[in-house]
Every structure is written in C-alpha cells, then in structure tokens.
Amino acid sequence: MTLTRRARITGAVLCAALALVLGVWIVRDLTSVDNPLDLLRLWTTGNDRGNAAVPLTTTLDDLVLFLVYVTVGVAALRSPVAAAALVAAGVITLAVRLPRLWVLSSSWMGLRASDELRTRALYFTFAAIALGVGLLITAVAGRRRARPGASAPYTAYTAYTAYDAYAAQAAHERTPTRPTRGVSVLAFVLLSAAAGVLAAWEVRTATRNRGRGYPDRFTGSESMPLPLLGTPPGWLTAVIVVLALVAAFGALFHAVYSRPLGLVVAAFLLGAGGRGVDTAIRNELLPGLGDLPTWDQLLVLSWLFELTAGAVLVLALARRGESAAQGAVRPSGYGYGYPQGGGTGPPPPSSPPPGW
C-alpha cells in the first residue's frame, strides 16, 4: 500500500521527534563523562567506570533505536511505500518503552536517580509511547485511496490497458517491495536461527539456580544493574525473539513487512552481538576459546553468530526488493500491455474504442 504525501510527512515528523528526544538523552550522557569512550564502555559492559558527574541513563539499545528512527524517517520522506517501515518503528517503540512505566515507578529506582530525573524519564516514556502509537495510526490511516475512475494497478488478472496509461500509472503509483526469493530463504534461516539462539539462552537463564530471581529479568530489581532508560533484559530478549519469528515467516511467504521488520531485528542483533564480541575481546576469550568451559564457548560463539547474522541481514534486506506487480506486464510493440504467465482476459480489439 502507498501513503499519501501528508502521511509520509507526518511519519517523518514523528520519527524525527522520537530521534530528537532520544538524542537529547544520549547527548546528556555524552556531556556527563570525561571521555566519550566512557559512555561506550558503559553501553558495552553495563558498568559505569567513567567519571560521570551525574548518573548515566542510556544504553546501546537506545543508540540502535535512534538509528532506526533516523532511517525510517528518511525512508518515509523518500518513498511512498514506507508504511511497513513506520509500522515496524512503531511496534519496536511500544515494545521497548512499555516496561519503563513500571520500572520507573518502582521504589528501588529511587536509589539510582533523583525524583526529578525519574519524572523526566517518565514524561519521555509517555511521549515515546504516544509517538509510537502515532506511527501506527499514520501507517494505517494514511493509505492512498484510489481515485474515482482511476485504473487499477497492473496484475495478471486485470484487463488490458494502453501502454501509455500503464507507464503513467507505474511512474506515480508504486507497490511495496518484498524480499526476493533468495533473500527470503536467507532471512528465514538467519532470523529463525537467531530467535532459537536467544530463546535457548533465556531457557538456560531461567533454569539456572532453579529460576530464583528470573522474573527480575522482566520487571527489574534493585540487584539488577539497569540504566534509567534501559529495558529489562528478559523482556527485550522476548520482544526480539517474537519479532524475529514474525519477520522470518513473513520473509518465507514474501510478505511486504518482512523487510523493515527484519532490518529492525538485524539492528538489535548487531548491537547485542557487537556488545558480546567486545566483551570477549577485552577479556581475551577468543584466543583461548578452546580452553574455555563448554557453556562459555557456546556463549562466545553465540555472540559471534549474532554479530554475523545481523550484518548479513542488514546487507541482504537493505537491497531493493521486488514489486508485488513486478513482471506482471510487459509492453508490446503495438502500444498494449500483455500480462505474462498466461494471464486471462480477451485480446485487445482490432479497432480500439475512444479512450482505450
């Protein structure tokens, strides 16, 4: 489905607003440390080893979200078929920000941040949720409606029309692109495998220590380090697993939404894998990988797989896909469009009527 120009501008403005308010928090943290590397160290290790004058608030996932908003906003301005991208941005926004409603209201969070800072973070959470809902509404309500008397898009099942009418329609009305067959298979395999790996580690975490303290991974707790804008790790993992499976099966059936949703999942896989590989490099785990205990070996290999899968998915899904109507019509030398693949319908008349 295509979006009206007003809907595209609205979607771009909403993405810009999300990127702006999130960027303010990131800049706040950058100005709170002596060295930007201190903030990077916090994002990759979860430990504040810098000389921050005030508590740091953001995570590496916030940087990933910032990049998602910028990318989707630019896509909305440039493409009339960015509705699926707006939906993907809205869904990930709601999924990541909803836990902040109960985390910021917890009594133990008062030990890590002042009431003023918590209030500002809560306002930001409400604003982000509202903007995320706005993206979903814009994608649904901003669809371009067919003009009265306008010809339908070309498929193998529509009647024949003149080639010049087809050319004009193709120039002004595009159809959303979906992954090609090879990319679909690749995306299905990698996204399904990534979902399986993440789910397996969650099961391992849940069964360790007989599940004691495991609910804290979804609700947060005083004993769990969690920045002010951070998402509980169990909740975030569950969200990525669900979205990865939805995108994987969507790619298998060449669904339009599979490309933007798969790219969002790939971005988070890149962030998680990069954070893990950075941990492995700093602790010199890669040179002695064979000497590590089995579970540690599997953990390092999982980090490498997430990083590789994320990078491959970004490169594959970022390529232009194929149109829903691509290849359906081929113009003939007589000025008529003939459906390929044995399309049904009568041949054009020998003497076309006026307006044919």
Image (cartoon, helix red, strand yellow):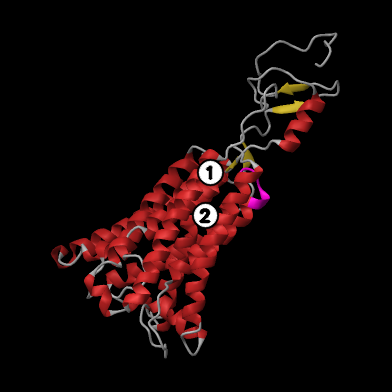
The magenta segment is 77-81
**Is 246 drawn above or below residue 222 in the view shown?**
above
- Drawn side of residue 273 relative to residue 118, left or right: right
Q: Earlier in the sequence, mark 1 or mark 2?
A: 1
Number of numbered tags placed on the structure image: 2
Whether 72 is among the magenta residues is no
In the picture of the structure, the residue carrying the numbered disc 2 is 263
Q: Position of residue 210 (x, y in %)?
A: 13, 64
Examine the image and state in which quarter residue 51 appears: bottom left
Identify which amino acid the numbered label 1 is placed on: Ala
Q: Residue at x 60, y 54 (%)?
A: 12
Disc 2, SS? helix
Image quadrant where one finds the N terminus: top right
Q: Residue at x 67, y 38 (%)?
A: 174
* Residue 301 at least partly seen: no
Front-lying residue, 305 or 213: 213
State the mark number for residue 292.
none
Front-lying residue, 27 or 240: 27
Q: Position of residue 169 (x, y in %)?
A: 74, 31
- Drawn side of residue 113 relative to residue 268, left or right: left
Gap between marks 1 and 2 measured at Cα = 18 Å
In the picture of the structure, the residue carrying the numbered disc 1 is 139
Q: Residue at x 42, y 83 (%)?
A: 282
Identify which amino acid the numbered label 2 is placed on: Leu
Q: Position of residue 84 (x, y in %)?
A: 53, 45
Disc 1, SS? helix
